[in-house]
Amino acid sequence: MTEWFVVSEEFGLWSLFLSAFLSSTLLPGSSEALLITFLSQGFNEFSLLMVATTGNTLGGLTSWLLGFWLIKKYPHSIPEKISPESIERLRRWGWPVLLLSWLPVIGDPLCLAAGWLRLNFYLSLLAIAAGKLLRYSAIVWLFS
C-alpha cells in the first residue's frame, strides 16, 4: 500500500493531468505509476481515466502541432535519420497509425511526424485520444 503518499483527490487529479501531459510529449513522465497509486487510494476511477486520457491526448496534440509548425518553418528540411521509406509508409498508413501513439519510445515521434506530414488534425485527434483511452482503460481495469 502507498500510505506514505496520500494526497487530496483534487491535487491528485491535477498532478495526474500534468504527469500524463508531460509523458505524452518528448519529456519523460510516469503517469501510469500515479494512476495506479491513486487507484489504490480509492480515487474515482472514471475521473482518473478521463483526466489521464485528456492530459495524455493534449500532450500528443502538442507534439502534432510541433511537427506541423516545423514543416511550416523549415519546409525543405527532412531530418537525416528519417528514411524516405519511413515517411512514405506513414503517409500510406495515415492517421490510423496514431492509435499506437500510446506506445513508449515510438508514440511521441509518431505524433510529431503526423503533424509534420499534415495528417488531418481531427482524425489525428480522434486516433490519439482513442489509443490513449484504451491504454488507460486497461490500466484502470487491471489495477481496480
Image (cartoon, rainbow, N blue to C red):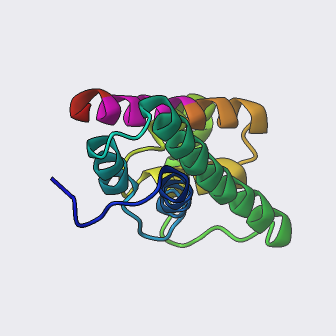
Is residue 101 found left or right of 120 in the rendered image? Answer: left
Which of the 4 quarters of the picture holds residue 63? bottom right
In the image shown, does 105 or 79 lie closer to the viewer?
105
Residue depicted at 72% across the width and 40% down the height: 119
Q: Position of residue 10 (x, y in %)?
A: 55, 53
Residue depicted at 68% across the width and 36% down the height: 125
**What predominant SS class does the magenta segment belong to?**
helix
82 within the magenta span: no
Q: Position of residue 22 (x, y in %)?
A: 53, 64
In the image, which residues are magenta?
130-140
Decide: is 140 above or below 15: above
Q: Is residue 102 visible from the viewing direction of this image? A: yes
Decide: is 18 above or below 45: below
Q: Position of residue 45 (x, y in %)?
A: 42, 32
Quadrant (top left, top right, bottom left, bottom right) of the C terminus:
top left
Is residue 75 found left or right of 13 in the rendered image? Answer: right
Which of the 4 quarters of the picture holds residue 40? top left
Decide: is 143 above or below 66: above
137 within the magenta span: yes
